[in-house]
């Protein structure tokens, strides 16, 4: 697996769980094992800077995705292959959302990694049909990985 997980924060994160989730998502979304993915955890200052630079929005957000090869979902016969891109997560915002949602930070991070990876595969939630497709798949994947009903994405107005 070509999954790189970097923690550029002071938060103590379960990096192996993120790698295990990545492997699970690769398998279930039919992504070739050699496809490259980076999951980077950054502090709120770095996330705020990215949020402003790429989306023109102030303040930190929970997750941002930066696709590289614009891959689309693969099939078992023809898995998606190439550079997926980067998923950038703020553990501080994730912790805030987990507290509001009444679940663990680890489950919030699993949600954000899954959400970010779906964005890298071209899923989006600009209209209700796209949102329904993306969030249904997201919930299905997480429920199977976690073994229980997963948290839902915090709506921060984006």
Image (tube, grey):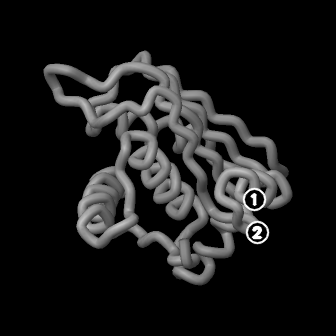
- Quick check: 9 left or right of 106? right
Q: Which residue is mark 1?
A: 52
- Among numbered discs 1 and 2, the one appearing first in the sequence: 1
Instruction: Pinpoint residue 59: horizontal percent, then vertical percent.
Output: 77, 68
Which of 55/64 is in front? 55
Q: Residues within 10 Å of mark 1 (few under 14, many from 20)?
A: few
Q: Is residue 11 above or below residue 83?
A: below
- Locate the C terminus and report the quarter of the image it occupies: bottom right
Q: Quadrant of residue 124?
A: bottom left
Instruction: Pinpoint residue 11: horizontal percent, then vertical percent.
Output: 77, 54
In this orientation, does residue 147 appear? no
| Disc 1 from disc 2: Cα separation | 6 Å
- Quick check: 62 left or right of 35? right
Query: Which residue is at a point 33% across and 69% down the rendered structure image?
Result: 127
Element marked by disc 2: loop
Q: Which mark is residue 58?
A: 2
Which of 80/122 is in front? 122
Query: Which residue is at a point 24% across and 30% down the rendered structure image?
Result: 74
Q: Which mark is residue 1?
A: none
Q: Residues within 10 Å of mark 2 (few under 14, many from 20)?
A: few
Q: Is residue 124 above or below residue 84?
A: below
Q: Are marks 1 and 2 in contact (CB under 8 Å)?
A: yes
């Amino acid at each position: 697996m070509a999954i790189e997980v970097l923690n550029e924060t002071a938060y103590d994160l379960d990096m192996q769980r993120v790698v295990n989730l990545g492997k699970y998502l690769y398998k279930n979304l039919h992504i070739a094992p050699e496809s490259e993915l980076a999951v980077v955890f950054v502090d709120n200052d770095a996330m705020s800077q990215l949020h402003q630079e790429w989306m023109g929005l102030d303040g930190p957000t929970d997750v941002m995705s930066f696709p590289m090869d614009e891959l689309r979902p693969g099939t078992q016969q023809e898995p998606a292959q190439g550079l997926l891109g980067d998923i950038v997560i703020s553990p501080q915002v994730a912790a805030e959302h987990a507290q509001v949602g009444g679940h663990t930070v680890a489950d919030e991070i699993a949600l954000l990694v899954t959400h970010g990876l779906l964005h890298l595969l071209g899923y989006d939630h600009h209209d209700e049909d796209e949102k329904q497709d993306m969030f249904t798949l997201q919930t299905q994947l997480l429920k199977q990985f976690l073994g229980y009903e997963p948290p839902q994405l915090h709506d921060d107005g984006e």
